[in-house]
Amino acid sequence: MADLERRAFAECRVEQDGKRLRGYAIVFNQKSVDLGGFREVILPEAVDRTLKEAIDVRALVDHDSSKVLGRTTAGTLTLRKKATGLYIDIDPPNTTASRDILESVRRGDVTGMSFAFRVLEDDWRESEGMPLREVIDMRISEVSIVSFPAYPDTEVSLRALERFKAQRPGHSVDWWRKWHQTQLAR
């Protein structure tokens, strides 16, 4: 589980009838905020494996596995690749967690979406004086409706990058890329 990463990029909305959740869990070709010394871009092809292999993705509330809203294998979560990003459509169950999040999204109190993934291929380079990671291939395990669409759940990656920087000051992005791949292989 150490290589599981989470990112929050996008928006969520409730369908007119108030019974479905839709939005973009991933936005393509957009730089993230500073993730603790690097920025990140999700390339459009990064979601292809998840869609092609029909990976069993779950929709959750705030990455909480006890609050399941939908699942691809159950047909209650649909993932579609669009030009903008990975579009999701959730048909949530009639549960307390679902009713609560539907109401919070309807009111505009909760508007964020996030996703959890494992990187299979990435590329690192310098951009605007900062390392930039381009995610080329990944396995998505879940999408979430989140209260705080920021990046608090990426602590493992951030600690790893900081540890690397402290051990190898002055190394190039090529070194960072190789080191990061080594960490994910563990």
Image: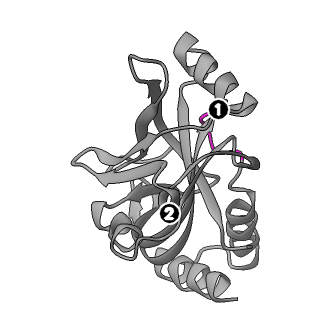
Foreground pick, 39 / 59: 59
Q: Is residue 124 visible?
A: no
Secondary structure at badge 1 equals: loop
Image quarter of residue 46: bottom left
User: What's the residue type where badge 1 is placed?
Assistant: Asn
Give how far apart the Cα atoms at labels 2 and 1 are. 18 Å
- Left or right: 23 with respect to 140? left
Residue 87: x percent and y percent? 36, 45
- Left or right: 20 with respect to 29? right
Q: Residue at x 63, y 62 (%)?
A: 5
174 versus 85 height, above or below: below
90 versus 117 height, above or below: above
Extent of the magenta region: 148-152
Q: Pointer 2: residues within 10 angstroms few (<14), some, or many (20+)?
A: few
Q: Residue at x 41, y 64 (%)?
A: 126
Q: Quadrant of the C terminus?
A: bottom right
User: What number is the disc on residue 73?
Assistant: 2
Residue 136: x percent and y percent? 37, 71
Label 1 sits on residue: 94
Whichever of labels 2 and 1 marks the residue nearer the N terminus, that label is 2
Residue 176: x percent and y percent? 56, 77
163 versus 143 height, above or below: below
Q: Residue at x 64, y 32 (%)?
A: 94
Image quarter of residue 84: top left
Foreground pick, 8 / 34: 8
Inspect the magenta stretch and tell me whether residue 149 lies in it: yes
Q: Main secondary structure of the magenta part?
A: loop
